[in-house]
Image: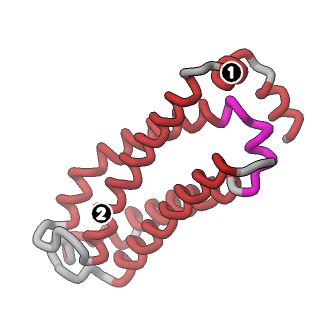
Amino acid sequence: MLSICQWIHQTSLSVAIRESIWVYPILNVLHCVGILLVAGTIVVVDLRLLGFGMRRTAVSSVVSQVLPWTLSGFGFMLLTGSLLAWSEPVRLYRSVFFPWKLLFLAIAGLNALLFHLGVYRGVGSWDSATLTPARARLAGALSILCWICVIAAGRAVGYETT
């Protein structure tokens, strides 16, 4: 794996991003915008699931309104994050926090998948309830926790000295 990272590190795209005065910082800011879109819209849904906001709004309405923004933000975050990772693969390979970021991102994705394939399928019976089912509340709480961990681990990568 290290040899692949070393090869990527030497590609012209990696060097161009890493050595540019403007490209890396702009990608970093755009990546933060993508994270803001994803985590922000997801937290809106999670807070509704937990009963901390928009109690008079149906869960399905909240989900349908924010889902396009969430998916767009995720695509944007994935693209910019991939370019950032491409620019410094050896550093990320040696990072303590980068694998944690990816792990929490995977757990957040699995949680969302299980929520949508599981408890959300029966949303019709609890859509307007102030108190959502325990499994929905658990999914919301786990989601918030995962996104806090994704963001914290990502920030830690930036301050890590390897």
The structure residue drawn at horizontal position 23% and vertical position 53%, both measured from the top left corner, is 64
Above or below — where is 43 with respect to 56? above
Query: For the residue marked with disc 2, what is the amino acid?
Result: Val
Magenta region: which residues? 85-96
Q: Label 1: how many residues lie within 10 Å, few (<14), some (14-19) or many (20+)? A: few
Q: What secondary structure prevails in the magenta region?
A: helix
> Is 148 left, or right, of 68 in this rendering?
right
Task: Name the spot of residue 68 as percent of width and height, x first.
Answer: 30, 44
Q: Is residue 15 above or below residue 137?
A: above
Which image quadrant is residue 127 in? bottom left
- Mark 2 vs mark 1: in front: 1
In the picture provided, is 127 more to the left or to the right than 158?
Answer: left
The residue that appears at 40% across and 49% down in the rendered structure is 38
Q: Which residue is mark 2?
A: 45
Taking the image as shown, residue 4 lies to the left or right of residue 15, namely right
Residue at 77%, 41% in the rendered image: 91
**SS at mark 2 in the image:** helix
Q: Say which residue label 1 marks.
A: 19
Report the amino acid beneath label 1: Glu
Q: Is residue 47 above or below residue 156?
A: below
Q: CA distance from mark 2 to mark 1?
A: 39 Å
Percent x, y for residue 149?
55, 63
Is 127 or 73 nearer to us in this picture? 73
Tell whether position 7 is magenta: no
Q: Position of residue 27 (x, y in %)?
A: 52, 30
